Amino acid sequence: MLDEKPFDKNANNAATSPAYLSVWNIEAYYGESYIVQDVSFNVHEGEILALLGRNGAGKTTTLRTIARMDSPELRFGEVWLDHQPLHTMASHAAAQNGIALVPEDRRIIPGLTVEENLKLAQIAPPIGWSLERIYSLFPRLGERKNQDGVTLSGGEQQMLAIARALARDIKVLLLDEPYEGLAPVIVQEIAKTLNIIRDQGITTIIVEQNAVAALKLADRAVILDTGRVVYDDSAQKVLDDEKLRAEYLAI
Ligand SMILES: Nc1ncnc2c1ncn2[C@@H]1O[C@H](COP(=O)(O)OP(=O)(O)OP(=O)(O)O)[C@@H](O)[C@H]1O
């Protein structure tokens, strides 16, 4: 389905690309396991991109590579965000430059209230949204600000994990399976919030097993199959293409 690569491998480099976030020919490994195999895509500022594919396709590994986590190891390729070379950075520097990864397990800190979880995110610059602004987007968190974070419902914990990312000054939100284990009504509530976050200018990549929900939210989709890009185009086209959905998403 991918007619042409977003980048010419022989071009100078991605620094000159007009894209906001450019993932350019990345190759990432866990030990000697070659997982992300020459993956390239662009994300435009303020866009929501759904990164989809079957189990084990390499979606989480791609997110972790962009966020510059210690593992996987990026052995080839470049990642540029707003003209900054993330591929040269460690995870803390990538975070300072505006990348926020919300992992699948949400990582709410035990023993801290909702508000303490948020305040901890703001302990050092760059500080993002104020608590007031966060609570106006997530009224449920405001109502529960003194509750122990780990006692929140699954949906509320997901909201807290996203809110904690916004508490820092971020450019790109990387969401790994935000809808996992949540009831459809909560999925809808979170999707509404993600739309508002997009309207505030934040760029999002969402990895999600609930592909239909992610496609309804997203502007564009990239589909991975065994570590390679097999589709890079509009999200709506995937929803409309039964054959494509069956082949790469099994839906
Ligand atoms: N820490 C690790 N060490 C070794 N191999 C790993 C590690 N994490 C993931 N893998 C392997 O990398 C491949 C891609 O995994 P990844 O989690 O990126 O896929 P995914 O598309 O996110 O899948 P899922 O939808 O099931 O979460 C899989 O074969 C997986 O077994």
Image (tube, rainbow, N blue to C red):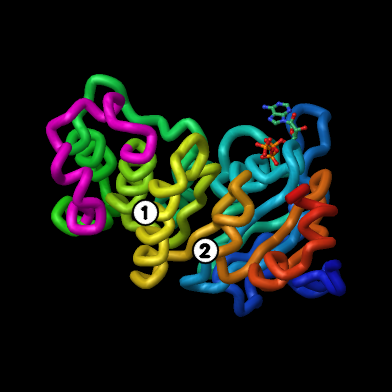
Q: Earlier in the sequence, mark 1 or mark 2?
A: 1
Q: What residue is disc 1 on?
A: 189
Whole-percent x and y of residue 203? 47, 65
Q: What residue is disc 2 on?
A: 217
Which sits in the foreground, 238 or 15? 238
Left or right position of 229 against 48: right
Magenta span includes 53: no
Under 8 Å from ligand 1: the CB of mark 2? no
As helix, strand or loop, the secondary structure at mark 1 comes to helix
Q: Is residue 112 visible?
A: yes
Left or right position of 202 against 204: left
Q: Is residue 161 above or below residue 190?
A: above
Q: Is residue 124 above or below residue 39?
A: above
Which residue type carries mark 2?
A: Leu
Q: Main secondary structure of the magenta part?
A: helix
Left or right position of 105 against 151: right
- Badge 2, how many Cα within 10 Å: few under 14, some, many 20+? many
Whole-percent x and y of residue 93? 46, 47
**Residue plotted at (40% across, 49% down):** 185
Residue at mark 1 to residue at mark 2: CA–CA distance: 12 Å
Which residue type carries mark 1?
A: Glu
Which sits in the foreground, 44 or 213? 213
Magenta span includes 146: yes
| Range of residues picked out in magenta | 134-156
Q: Is residue 28 visible?
A: no
Left or right position of 116 against 218: left
The quarter of the picture where residue 92 lies is: top left
Under 8 Å from ligand 1: the CB of mark 1? no
Q: How many marks?
A: 2
